[in-house]
Image (cartoon, coloured by chain):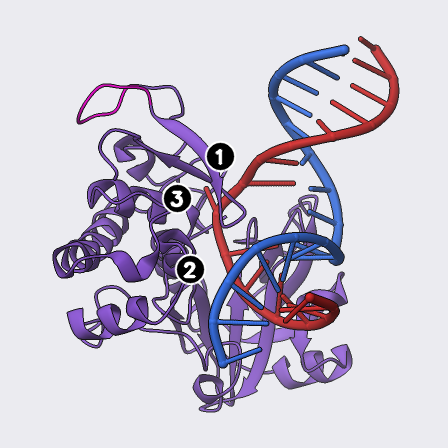
Chain colours: A purple, B blue, C red
Amino acid sequence: MPELPEVEAVRKSLVELVVGKTIKDVFVGWPKIIKKPLEIEQFQDALQGQTILDINRRGKFLIFVLDDYALVSHLRMEGNYSVRSHDDPEEKHTHIVFKFVDGTELRYRDVRKFGTMHLFTKGMEHTELPLAKLGPEPFAAEFTQNYLKEKLMKTERMIKAVLLDQTIVTGLGNIYVDEVLFRSSIHPERIAKTLSDEEVALLREQAAATLEESIQAGGSSVNTYMNSRGESGTYQERLLVYGKKGEGCKKCGIPLQKIKVAGRGTHFCPECQK
DNA sequence: CACGGCACCTGCCCGC
DNA sequence: TGCGGGCAGGTGCCGT
């Protein structure tokens, strides 16, 4: 479901809802979501008595900072959190529940069960997978023209595949890659190493600008995405190509096309993107 | 090592 | 109406 702007919206809402709460116990209904430790009882024992001190984000990962641990959570396609009273009826597809001492609980729902959670001793999370190999975020100081140019020049892949690669730049997903490529007038199937300096500069600017605009709008709610307070984002109203096959291009008016690139549905303008 | 393809799951939508 | 195929905002692992 979510790319960087949506995860940031979830993070902000969760900070308001659960920071300061202390975990009494944890229900695990689908153990495969817990990737570390693999022994579910260890996961539950470790979390008992821990207080949520803060919630950070790295790329598309949420990081719950606890007294002694860091819980790294990835929502993948459809994961979502909500905070309810323990006696509210449980929604379908609820797989993990963090029960707090105050009678409320943080519920993790995930229709497709693709989401993941990794529990680390506090401070260890950044040097181990899944966070260790992530590249810079588009607005990070390290995401420079030279950095991106160098990465693009040493691969034979198509530009769309490279922008989806979280070790090159983290935060973009299928929606925002299509948007960024349209805004940069670059065809998604261009071989990355054929991009000019000007095109690389444009990509870098548009990646940062697109994500920043979407964060301001609370992310995009294309299907059912919502933050943890149940609120939708509004950036879907400003998308230029994603999900708009057959509609007129905002720049030139000819119908937008949808093709498959790097295994993903890809929206673009055959006139504006060369 | 780099890359493409597939697996992981469920639900929905479309065409027959 | 029912069924099969294809699709979905992501990533890790596998084989070539």
Residue B14, compared with residue A120, is above or below; it is above
Mark 3 or mark 2: which comes first in sequence?
2
Q: Are dots 1 and 2 in contact, CB under 8 Å?
A: no
Seen from the viewer's position, the closer of residues A118 and A67 is A118
Same chain for the residues under marks 3 and 1 in the image: yes
- In magenta segment, residue A252: yes
Magenta stretch in the rendered image:
A248-255
Q: Residue furthest left?
A: A198
Judged by depth in the image, the label closer to the viewer, 3 or 2, is 2
Residue under the point 17% across and 58% down:
A196
Same chain for the residues under marks 1 and 2 in the image: yes
The residue under label 3 is A175
User: Residue A157: which numbered mark, if any?
Assistant: 2
Residue A10, compared with residue A48, is above or below; it is above
Q: What percent of the width, then of the height, locates residue A128? A: 51, 86
User: Residue A223: which numbered mark, if any?
Assistant: 1
Same chain for the residues under marks 3 and 2 in the image: yes
Q: Residues within 10 Å of mark 1 (few under 14, many from 20)?
A: few
Q: What percent of the width, then of the height, locates residue B15? A: 67, 13
What is the count of numbered marks?
3
Judged by depth in the image, the label closer to the viewer, 1 or 2, is 2
Residue A61, compared with residue A173, is above or below; it is below
Residue C9, compared with residue A46, is above or below; it is above
Mark 1 or mark 2: which comes first in sequence?
2
Q: Is residue A238 visible?
A: yes
Q: Amino acid at mark 3?
A: Ile
User: Residue A48: which numbered mark, if any?
Assistant: none
